[in-house]
Amino acid sequence: MEQYLDIAKRILEEGKWIENKRTGKRCLTIINADFTYHVDKNEFPLVTTRKAFWKAAIAEMLGYLRGYDSAAQFRAIGCNTWNANANENTDWLANPNRKGEDDMGRVYGVQGRQLKVSPTEAQYDLLLSLNDSGDKEGVKTLINELRKNTFDQLRKVYDNLKKGIDDRGEIISFWNPGEFNQGCLRPCMFMHHFSVLDGTLYLNSYQRSCDYALGYVFNAPQCYFLLAIMAQITGLKCGKVYHKVVNLHLYEDQLELMRDVQIARKPFASPKLHINPDIKTLDDLMTWVTTDDFTVTDYQHHDPIKYPFSV
């Protein structure tokens, strides 16, 4: 909480006003902040100066890990954060790549689980051969197959960590500029880099942009949860999360609530996150796990604050 409040005060004292093109609103903005979360001490980074709905935050990360691409899928596991971006984002509604109601497109977990990759040399050679022979149906079939060429970043990282391997590149990236036009929103938290040192798992998470009043309340516990759950299913000890945020901002219609209400409140000690010990593999996470498999204890908090949300 000290980290959170210090950065909130810094935004209020040092921030510069910029116009956000997507939302049409002004934002009070600073550049660069670094946060550390002690997963090794089970200090769950839930904001205590207002009530934070941590189950929805974990549900969202669970949806990312599963590669969900529909707001309906997220709703089914207890997360409503994608409803507006999937169904009210004007640019996305007009995008020919949108498949219909609740479609999010190729964002976040889709990139983490189904990153599109180039055809192999053998596939190129076969395509040329089919084309030269005039086999139009064969060309069409192969092209459809090539569109399915994907790489599962999460599975690669999980398999390596499970074996105790750290190739210094245990990275899951959601950032794919070539497919920005195929999703409703560019990822804010765009990369997670895992490292192993002496049997302990560490995580560096990188975020390009953060709505500090609303987004950070989700993002901090998500980073913590990601390290905690990956450590559990790979058999490693929990270390620390290092969370870097580049652009931190408060929207103009959030400013008064942050300045006059939230940062004026006295924070409480960090609560603790407990994970069902029966969750032992990545396949468990993909199949039967729900938010009921996670509990938080010792969570003292002030009353909720209803901040405006910008689509």
Image (cartoon, rainbow, N blue to C red):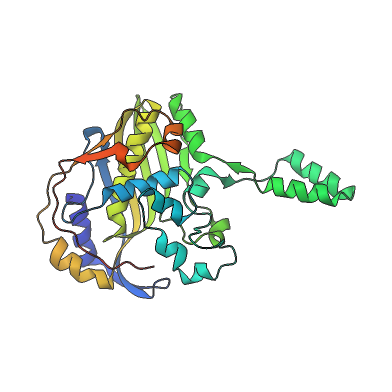
Image-quadrant location for residue 83: bottom left
| Closer to the camera in the image, 130 or 14 | 130
Q: Is residue 194 above or below residue 260?
A: above
Q: What residue occupies the far right of the structure in this picture?
A: 133
Quarter of the picture holding the C terminus? bottom left
Asked whether residue 68 appears in the rendered view, the answer is yes
Q: Position of residue 14 (x, y in %)?
A: 23, 66
Image-quadrant location for residue 291: top left
Please give the count of numbered marks on the rendered protein.
0
Q: What residue occupies the far left of the structure in this picture?
A: 266
**x 59%, y 62%: residue:** 97
| Closer to the camera in the image, 34 or 47 | 47
Q: Position of residue 255 (x, y in %)?
A: 22, 69
**x 42%, y 47%: residue:** 63
Locate residue 305 relative to residue 143 in the image: left or right: left
Asked whether residue 167 appears in the rendered view, the answer is no
Image-quadrant location for residue 254: bottom left
Q: Is residue 192 above or below residue 281?
A: below
Q: Position of residue 236 (x, y in %)?
A: 35, 27
Q: Position of residue 131 (x, y in %)?
A: 85, 50
**x 47%, y 34%: residue:** 157
